[in-house]
Every structure is written in structure tokens, then in C-alpha cells.
Amino acid sequence: MIYLIQSTIMNQPFIAHKLIQCCFLFILAYAIGSCAPSRIVRPMDKGQKSLSAHVGGPMIDDSKNIIPVPLSSIMYAQGVSDKITGFASIHATSLYYGVVQTDMGFCTHLYYNEEIKLGFSATPVLNMAFDTWVGYFKLWPQLDLNVYWELEPDKSFIYLGIENWFELSKYKAHEQLQKNHWLVNAHLGFTYVRNKWDYTLETKYLVPYLESRPNVVDYKGINGNGALGLYISFTRKF
């Protein structure tokens, strides 16, 4: 979620006039879920490298169709060891509108059952954003906890998990008190593994305990709470 852009739009009229050229900037400003899918769920082999492209976001009703917000990012990852994989990304959509946004962290192996091919992992992440218009900087810690089940023979896998996003700021835009400092999203996905390429489809239920209406856009959640998200990822391994 890009509170940085929200603050910029709400407090800088001349910048808001520039950004209003594209309607989904308002979606970025008020997004109630994360801007990217789960990063690394299963640690890579030591020394292995990969480059991934991602697109997707919360589902909204644009008055004609129900579609995911086309947020996008590019990520590089590398296996530090067989149990730890480091990664860093750049958010292309935010960058196009003058906000340099990245998330970086690592995925670490917690447990793996060889007999049933079931594994657990944790992914601590640091999200950062810098507004090139006014020089405003923010960061958000994040912790993902995942369980994955490998499918033979190619080790494609199904995974599910919980994303914990921590808002450190005391105030929102207009000096409103920030009441939600711990935001939780649930996700479920499938990664189709090939020799050089991986393909991932992920769905999220973003902050299901918070009301999503009324809002600037019509988020599609369940009974007016949260928002469902859809993400697609393409990964090239080296």
C-alpha cells in the first residue's frame, strides 16, 4: 500500500494535478493491500539466480468490469545458501509516477518434511519509498509466514500464508490519527516450475477485517470488507 502517494496527493495540490492524469493513481493512493505478490516462498538453491516480473493488485469495479489494479514490479533474487534466498525489487508503476519504491529482504527455511514434501518458510521484508517530487521518504517492515507443498515430479508447488505489514507512522494524511499499525493479508498461490521458467498465480484477501466502503474506488471484498487481489508472476532462472 502506498501511503506515501496518498500523502502527496492529499497535501500537494500541484502534484495532485499532475498525477490525476491517470485514474488508477487514486487506486494507488488508497490501496488497502500490498502492491506486490508474495516474493520468495520456497528458498532457492545456493548460487541460483532469478529475475521476476509481476503484475496485479486489489480487485476493483471500474463500472464496466471487475479487474485487478495493474500494479507492476521487477525483482532479482539469489540463493545465499540452500536455506536462505535474498531479493530486492523495484516497483515500475510507482516509478512511472515519480515514486521510487522497493522491497528487499530474504526468505529463510524453517522446516521441511521430506516424506510429504511439505515446507515452512519465513520472509522478513523492508519496504521503502521515496517521493522524488517533494523528497518524502517512508518505510514499512513486513513479515510473511508461508507453508508450501511440493508436487512431483517437477516440484511445482501450492502455497498459502499470512503477510504482516507494519505501519510505523502515527498519522495519516490530513494529520489524522493512524489507527491500524498492524495489517494482515492472507494469500494462496500456485507456482508452475519448469527448467528455466516459473509461472505463479496468486490470490490475496487483503485486510479482511477492515471495511473497504465507502472509498475512492469500489474494492471487491466479501460483505464490504477488505479486497480480493489477483497477481501473476513470471520468473526466469539462471
Image: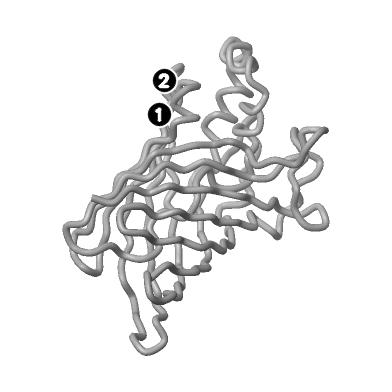
Per the image, label 2 sits on a secondary structure element best described as loop
Other residues around mark 2 within 10 Å, as few (<14) / some (14–19) / many (≥20): few
> Disc 2 to disc 1, how far (Cα)?
7 Å
* Residue 109 % position (x, y): 31, 71
Q: Which residue is disc 2 drawn over?
A: 132
Name the residue: 46% across, 73% down.
147
Other residues around mark 1 within 10 Å, as few (<14) / some (14–19) / many (≥20): some
Instruction: Decide: is 133 above or below 46.
Output: above
Q: What is the quadrant of the N terminus in the image?
A: top right
Total marks shown come to: 2
* Residue 119 % position (x, y): 39, 77
Q: Which residue is disc 1 drawn over?
A: 100
Instruction: Decide: is 115 above or below 174.
Output: below
* Disc on the earlier residue, 2 or 1: 1
Instruction: Decide: is 222 above or below 118.
Output: above
164 with respect to 29 (left or right): left
Name which residue type carries label 2: Thr
131 with respect to 174 (left or right): left
110 or 59, nearer to the observer: 59
Q: Badges 2 and 1: C-beta atoms under 8 Å apart? A: yes
Per the image, label 1 sits on a secondary structure element best described as strand
Q: Image quadrant of residue 24?
A: top right
Name the residue: 70% across, 40% down.
67
Camera-nearest label, 2 or 1: 1
